Image (cartoon, grey):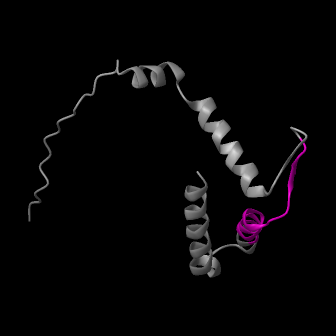
């Protein structure tokens, strides 16, 4: 999960550098604030849960894990793990030739 966040953070940094002059200043500042928070080593306090995280990145990682868990269809996951779901192959016949 951390690697995925690192990759997206790097992509966001590159995109900001390349597209900053095409962005509204407000939007660019918000992206910079997010990047700064994700890179900050300072502890993060979640007021809603009354919990302290080592940093903002760890907090966001935990939030994503919770979101993924909450959105997971547990009955389908059980079926996948038990091997009771069969694989289906979809065959599609597409003509990709173009007429001139």
Q: Is 77 located above or below residue 28 in the figure? A: above
Residue 4 lies in what quarter of the image? bottom right
Q: Residue at x 65, y 44 (%)?
A: 64
Q: Quadrant of residue 98?
A: bottom left
**On the picture, is 81 further left or further right than 87?**
right
Q: Residue at x 59, y 37 (%)?
A: 68
Residue 9 covered by magenta stretch: no
24 or 4: nearer the eye? 4
Task: Give the x, y percent position of residue 36.
Answer: 76, 69
Residue 92 horizontal/vertical position (percent): 17, 39
Q: Is residue 37 left or right of residue 86?
A: right
State which quarter of the image contains the C terminus.
Answer: bottom left
Q: Residue at x 81, y 55 (%)?
A: 54
Q: Position of residue 46 (x, y in %)?
A: 86, 46
- Is residue 41 rendered magenta in the image? yes
Picture layout, residue 39 above or below residue 52: below
Q: Which residues are magenta?
A: 29-47
Please determine whether, in this image, residue 11 is positioned above or below residue 77. below
Left or right of 56 on screen, residue 17: left
Would residue 91 appear left or right of 6 to someone viewing this image?
left
Residue 11 at x, y percent in the picture: 55, 68
Q: Which residue is located at x 11 percent, y 49 percent? A: 95
């Amino acid at each position: 999960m951390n690697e995925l966040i690192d990759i997206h953070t790097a992509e966001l940094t590159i995109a900001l550098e390349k597209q900053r002059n095409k962005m509204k200043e407000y939007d660019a500042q918000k992206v910079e604030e997010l990047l700064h928070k994700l890179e900050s080593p300072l502890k993060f306090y979640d007021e809603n849960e009354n919990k302290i995280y080592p940093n903002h990145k760890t907090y966001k990682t935990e939030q994503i894990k919770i979101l993924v868990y909450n959105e997971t269809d547990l009955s389908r996951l059980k079926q996948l793990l038990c091997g009771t779901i069969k694989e289906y192959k979809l065959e599609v016949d597409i003509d990709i030739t173009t007429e001139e």
